[in-house]
Image (cartoon, helix red, strand yellow):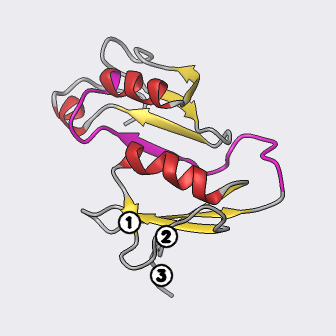
């Protein structure tokens, strides 16, 4: 059997608010002809360049433990350190700062979104191409 990932689903308490929070972080948009609205219990957004989709779906459960699966983000047009500041200003919470873990210019930062879902910010492709080794991409 061969399969592909249709989309990535994120459980949450408020699908609309969380999808709206993530749209500017990722540069994603609503699906054509299917706008997300307050009160929707499922909200899907997509990357206009790659088509990757994220589905936010409301569940009654609270997040209780560390995610077993998380998103690793890399800036499209800025450095990792500049993007850290943007994410914090947008309301992300820094959970752990691993910058420099493998020497200067290496490492990543672990964040939580407004509902506590963890995600990491790694160095940009340009920073990785510059040749500085890292423990994490």
Q: Quadrant of residue 14?
A: bottom right
Q: Secondary structure at mark 1?
A: loop
Q: Secondary structure at mark 2?
A: loop
Q: Answer whether labels 1 and 2 touch (C-beta < 8 Å).
A: yes
The image shows residue 105, relative to residue 2, as above or below, that is above
* Magenta-drawn stretch contains 59: no
Q: Which residue is mark 2?
A: 7
The residue at the point 47 percent across, 81 percent down is 3
Q: Which residues are magenta?
A: 61-81
Quote the CA–CA distance across marks 3 and 2.
12 Å
Count of residue discs: 3
* Magenta-drawn stretch contains 76: yes
N-terminal label among 3 and 1 = 3
Quote the CA–CA distance across marks 1 and 2.
7 Å
The residue at the point 23 percent across, 39 percent down is 125
Q: Secondary structure at mark 3?
A: loop
Q: Is residue 2 left or right of residue 26?
A: right
Question: Which mark is on residue 52?
Answer: 1
Q: Nearer the viewer, residue 7 or 55?
A: 55
The image shows residue 93, relative to residue 113, as above or below, that is above
- Tell me residue 38's x, y (percent): 61, 61
State the predominant SS element of the stretch in magenta.
loop
Q: Is residue 64 left or right of residue 112?
A: right
Q: Which residue is mark 3?
A: 3
């Amino acid at each position: 059997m061969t399969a592909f990932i249709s989309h990535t689903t994120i459980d949450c308490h408020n699908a609309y608010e969380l999808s709206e929070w993530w749209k500017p972080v990722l540069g994603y948009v609503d699906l054509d002809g299917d706008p997300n609205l307050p009160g929707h219990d499922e909200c899907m957004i997509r990357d206009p360049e790659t088509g990757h989709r994220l589905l936010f779906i409301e569940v009654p459960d609270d997040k209780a433990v560390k995610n077993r699966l998380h998103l690793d983000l890399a800036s499209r047009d800025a450095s990792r350190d500049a993007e850290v500041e943007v994410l914090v200003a947008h309301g992300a919470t820094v959970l752990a700062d691993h910058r420099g873990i493998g020497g200067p210019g290496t490492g990543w930062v672990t964040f939580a979104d407004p509902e506590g879902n963890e995600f990491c910010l790694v160095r940009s492709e340009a920073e990785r191409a510059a040749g500085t080794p890292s423990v994490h991409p």
